[in-house]
Amino acid sequence: MRKKIILSAILFGLFGTCFGQQISTWNQWSWLIGDWKGEGSGQPGQGGGTFSFKADLDQKILVRESHSEYPALGIKPAVIHDDLMVVYPDYSGSPVKAIYFDNEGHTINYSVTYSDKTIVLTSDKIGNIPVFRLTYIQLNDESVDTKFEISQDGVKFNSYIEGKSKKIR
């Protein structure tokens, strides 16, 4: 009888630990969840767009969808950029990874770090591929600053595009 109780306690502990790892909290993302509209500057020029963050799959992942439009600039044609990013928890249940896809054929794997009112996504270093950094800075309850930067060495980053967005819902 005593062995059954001990075995039951061990199995319950393992079962609880395994399923507990799948439960993710989005508290650090709560201020970003919703629909946003913004205007940016940078290459290929002035533009505008929208993005949204929404929890999906019973709160297990966070999905960002983004749409941007940049008008023609000189001899450069207008550009429409659409992307999708999924933020997901690692084995511990913490949302510290993300994967990004866009209509230009790019795929970027990110690691996520947090500080007060800031979420930073930094791409993995891979050979001769640039390192990308996407940063969200909460300015207040209804506005955010977004920066996308590129680095050849993973240390010195150059701004590619930056803009402020307002929460629309």
Image (cartoon, helix red, strand yellow):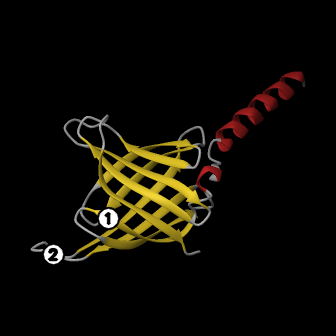
- Image coordinates of residue 114 in percent, x first then y, are 54, 43
Of all residues shown, which one is farthest toward the left? 75
Amino acid residing under circle 1: Ser
Please give the residue where the numbered disc 1 appears in the rendered image. Answer: 41
Q: For the residue labelled by badge 2, is the local secondary structure a helix, a strand or a loop? A: loop
Amino acid residing under circle 2: Pro
Answer few, some or many: residues within 10 Å of disc 1's Cα (few below 14, many 20 plus, some between 14 and 19).
some
Q: Nearer the viewer, mark 1 or mark 2?
A: 1
Foreground pick, 107 / 114: 114
Of all residues shown, which one is farthest toward the top? 2
Write the residue at 43% across / 57% down: 146
Res 138 label: none
Query: Between disc 1 and disc 2, whose residue precedes?
Result: 1
Quadrant showing the N terminus = top right
Res 77 label: 2
Q: For the residue labelled by badge 1, is the local secondary structure a helix, a strand or a loop? A: strand
Write the residue at 67% across / 44% down: 19
- Residue 55, compared with residue 15, is above or below; it is below
Splitting the image into 4 quarters, where does residue 30 fall?
Answer: bottom right
Q: State left or right for residue 76 relative to residue 10.
A: left
- Image coordinates of residue 104 in percent, x first then y, are 24, 63
Q: State left or right for residue 96 relative to residue 160.
A: right
Asked if the residue at tag 2 contacts the one at tag 1, i.e. Cβ–Cβ closer than 8 Å, the answer is no
Answer few, some or many: residues within 10 Å of disc 2's Cα (few below 14, many 20 plus, some between 14 and 19).
few
Write the residue at 53% across / 48% down: 118
Splitting the image into 4 quarters, where does residue 57 fall?
Answer: bottom right
- Image coordinates of residue 28 in percent, x first then y, are 61, 50
- Residue 134, compared with residue 42, is above or below; it is above
Write the residue at 9% across / 74% down: 75
Of all residues shown, which one is farthest toward the right? 1
Separation of marks 1 and 2 at Cα, in angstroms: 17 Å
